[in-house]
Image: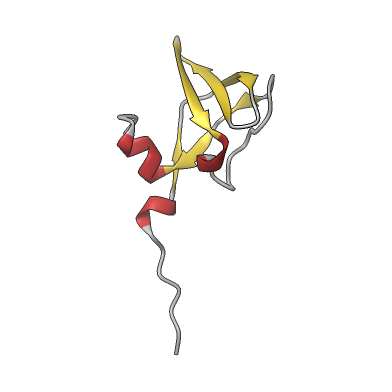
Amino acid sequence: MSRHVVDAGDMPYAFPEGKIVRATEKAVLYEYEGESVWVPQSVIHDDSDIWKKEEEGVLKVKSWWAKKNGHT
């Protein structure tokens, strides 16, 4: 019998609702509640509501990255 073990670092961390204001090939600039943060494309979680420049909603990232960068 095999079990799927979920790594807590892969769970999503949801930023407050905001907007992606800039995007490059490697990162997006997300603005929310008067704050802004560059987020690498590689840590945006598959469950994120938004991905591209000018999209508004909830940006979800991998929790290990959010914790490492002081967002939790």
Seen as rendered, the residue at the extreme front is 25
Q: In this view, does 35 lie above or below 47?
A: above
Q: Where is residue 49 in the image (x, y as percent from the top left)?
A: 62, 37
Residue sitting nearer the eye, 50 or 23: 23
Residue occupying image coordinates x 49% and y 23%: 38
**Front-lying residue, 32 or 29:** 29
Q: Specify the quadrant of the image occupied by residue 44.
A: top right
Q: Quadrant of the C terminus?
A: top left
Q: For this rendering, which residue is in front, 1 or 24?
A: 24
Quadrant of the rendered image containing residue 5: bottom left
70 relative to 13 in the view: left or right: left
Q: In the drawing, does residue 69 fall left or right of residue 56? A: left
Q: Residue 11: where, in percent of width, then height?
A: 43, 51
Q: Is residue 20 left or right of residue 10?
A: right
Q: Residue 36: horizontal and vertical position, in percent?
A: 47, 16
Total marks shown come to 0
Picture residue at 58% right of the left edge, 40% below the top: 48
Q: Quadrant of the N terminus?
A: bottom left
Farthest residue to the bottom: give it.
Answer: 1
Q: Name the residue: 65% across, 30% down.
A: 25
Q: In this view, does 33 lie above or below 4?
A: above
* Residue for point 69% across, 19% down: 54
Q: Locate residue 27, reporting x and y percent.
A: 57, 29
Q: In this view, does 17 lie to the left or right of 5?
A: right
Q: How is colour applied across the structure in the image?
A: secondary structure
The foreground one among 51 and 57 is 51
